[in-house]
Image (cartoon, helix red, strand yellow):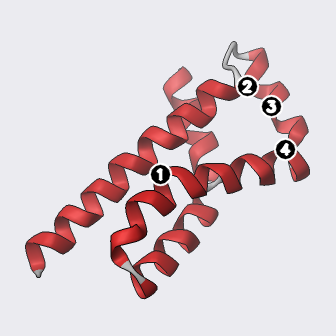
Amino acid sequence: MQLKLFWEFYKSALVINLVLAVISLVFNPSTLFVNLGLFAVLIIYLYKEHYRENEYYFYYNHHISKWQLFAFCFALNLFFSTLILLVLWKTS
């Protein structure tokens, strides 16, 4: 059940991740790992803190802390950026 909630949180921030991934791939693919891994999590955090701070209560009620949510986003971003870089490296 909790994995579903983590995934829902990640999907709610997916637009930010995709925009940063596309920008990274267009301008400098080698920065994808840093942009998705670190920069995207920071932007998602700032966005959620400013515009969606009441959304955390839903996750708190399911015993999921804010830091667990962002750690999950960070881990998935690192996984996906590594996967994309491996695919790009294999094709070039």
Q: Amino acid at mark 1?
A: Gly
Q: Amino acid at mark 2?
A: Tyr
The nearer-to-camera label among 4 and 2 is 4
Q: Mark 4 or mark 2: name the one nearer the start of the chain.
A: 4
Asked if disc 1 and disc 4 are in contact, CB closer than 8 Å, the reply is no
Q: Amino acid at mark 3?
A: Tyr
Image height of 26 relative to 87, above or below: below
Residue 56: x, y in percent? 80, 31
Mark 1 neighbour density, 10 Å: few (under 14) some (14–19) many (20 or more)? many
Please identify the residue farthest to the top as the structure is shown. 63
Residue 38, how many percent across, how many down? Answer: 53, 51
Q: CA distance from mark 1 to mark 3?
A: 22 Å
What residue lies at 89% left-to-right and 50% top-to-bottom?
A: 50
Circle 2 Cα neighbour tier, 10 Å, few/some/many (<14 / 14–19 / ≥20): some
Give the image quarter of residue 84.
bottom left
Is disc 3 in contact with disc 2, using a CB cutoff of under 8 Å? yes
Return the residue at label 2.
59
The residue identified by callout 3 is 56
Q: Earlier in the sequence, mark 2 or mark 1?
A: 1
Q: Which of the two labelled residues, at mark 1 and mark 4, occupies the earlier sequence position?
A: 1
At 43% across and 44% down in the image, what residue appears?
Answer: 76
Which quarter shows the C terminus?
bottom left
Q: Give the secondary structure at mark 2.
A: helix
The residue to which callout 1 is attached is 37
Q: Residue most toward the bottom?
A: 26
